[in-house]
Image (tube, rainbow, N blue to C red):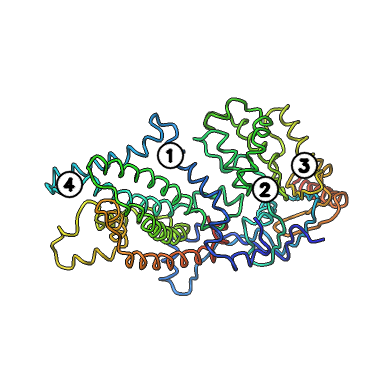
Amino acid sequence: MQPVIKLSNVDLIYRSAESLSYKKMLMSLIKKGSDLVLKHYKALNNVSVTMEKGKVYGIIGSNGAGKSTLLRVMSGVMSPNSGVVERNYQTINLLALGVGFLKELPGIDNIYLNGMLLGFSRKHIASVVQDIIAYSEIGEFIKRPMKTYSSGMVSRLGFAIAIHLKPEVLLIDETLSVGDAKFSAKSFASIQQIISDQDITVAIVSHSEALIQQFCDKVIWLDKGCIIEQGDTKSILDLYKQFNANAIKLQSMERPG
Amino acid sequence: MKSDNSSKVNRNRSVLKILWKNHEYILYYAGILLKQRVAGSYLGFLWLILQPLMFMLIYTFVVTMIFQNRMEHFNIYVLIGLNAWTLFQRSVMMAATAIVRNKVIFEQVYFHKSVYPSLYLASYVYEFLISTSLVFVMMFFNGIPFTWHIIEIIPVLLATVLFTYGCSLIIAHIGVYLFDLANILEFVLRFMFYLSPIMWNFANLNFRGAWVVKLNPMYVLIGSFRSCLLYGKSPVYGYLLIIAIVSCVLIQVGYSLISRYENEYARII
């Protein structure tokens, strides 16, 4: 079967904006030989991943390993400097709650705006808009400007939209708990339901090993932009745990006392 | 959001196809922007009529009272000029920051970056249509005959939109790299405002080489709007065609620039 997303030998380099200051540009013009010193940062290094339809992928690794960048390359908002990305899907959602909401406008307008942003037609959104409002438990506030919402209400609405407008590919960046304990349990159940849907391909970035163990079919372990290992959840998680335990041991040995 | 291969995404596509594919979102977002602009104010959508009306009154006062320059139907003359100018000036000004200000969106969802300036342009076209209805009201009160030439503002508006979009695309691209662009544009646009026949009439210019101002596309466009509405005449279609062709070249240049560099935007901003 054709993979939903396939990354082959992907490199991604960040260039920082400060490197484009006039001072440096002028200096490089005056001083011959001093080339523009650009700050490069290689966020992904020769990464190859194949994602199959309906599977759930977990992405693990320490901070700054390139996990979020990997999600962005998967979603297409970032293109690699080299390597090839193949995509075979119509709709994708990089789940970040409440992105693109306009605070001056009522929630109901923002539901449409957000849905269209994700590539759904106005007609389709209209068919689920009542469910979204009911699920988010916002009630009468839906007609009021979003600047009057509490932060919990904003993320609940964002989550309700993401749950009801089901994309073919769902990318989740550590945003599994939303709102109070009751809503959090509800959202967790919904995520579980979506993940078990055989038509939806999911990638989750998380630091929670328990969560990865529970949901994921495959695990990708990243460190400093490189893939260390990828494969079945259990075997990779065991390696990862062992590695972390060793690292902690090493650290405590280096520091006497 | 189908794309087969990221390195080939931008080929085999044209700016028209991209705009058409996203037209539902663009038009909806443009309406939302309009709503956002008046949100929270007591008078709400009335501002979209009041604003051009107030500016018309101010300019009419300044020119007829202070500069003692009397012209028949000057209020409509200046209103038509202002409407066209506002559409152009605001769209171009917003284009300078169109891509940067939507960072949160394009980190989440992929759109071709030439969509962003079109959002603002579309919302200012809505505003233009609303303020044009004010022109009709003023024409009624001034006793100016309504002729069939009024429908000829459609091709004039089309040429204006093409020209504005062409400028917007190029400026949107430069705006990503040059944060000072908005400041620079403010002067350039102010100068262009005075060079455009919004408050003055070409007949009143008596210095050598005054014809140079006619090279300004806004000169032709504003004049064409006035022909259709105020003077009951057809615009000069030859001039409009030249502007349309130049605009298409500008759009193509802007589109190629953005297509070529858009992958870099997210990594730089």
Point out the residue furthest to the left here.
B68
Residue at figure coordinates x 81%, y 57% from the top left: A229
Chain name for mark 1: B
Q: Quadrant of the N terminus of chain A?
A: bottom right
Instruction: First in sequence, mark 3 or 2: give its number.
Output: 2
On the picture, is A184 further left or further right than A33?
Answer: right
SS under mark 3: helix
User: Separation of disc 2 and disc 1 at Cα?
Assistant: 28 Å
Q: What is the x, y in percent for residue B245?
A: 40, 68
Disc 1 marks a residue whose amino acid type is Arg
Secondary structure, mark 2, is strand
Indicate left or right for A186 with A156 as reference: right
Residue annotated with mark 2: A93
Circle 1 Cα neighbour tier, 10 Å, few/some/many (<14 / 14–19 / ≥20): some
Residue ID at (48%, 50%): B119
Label 2 chain ID: A
Q: Which residue has dot 4 on it?
A: B63
Q: Which element is circle 1 on?
A: helix
Q: Amino acid at mark 4?
A: Val
- Please check whether the numbered discs 4 and 3 fall on a single chain: no
**Quarter of the figure with residue B2:** bottom right
Residue density around tag 2, few if under 14, some if 14–19, many if 20 or more, within 10 Å: many
Say which mark, if any, is on residue A194. Answer: 3
The alpha-carbon separation of the residues under discs 3 and 2 comes to: 13 Å
Residue type, mark 2 in image = Asn
Which corner quadrant holds the C terminus of chain A? Answer: top right
Q: Nearer the viewer, mark 4 or mark 3?
A: 4
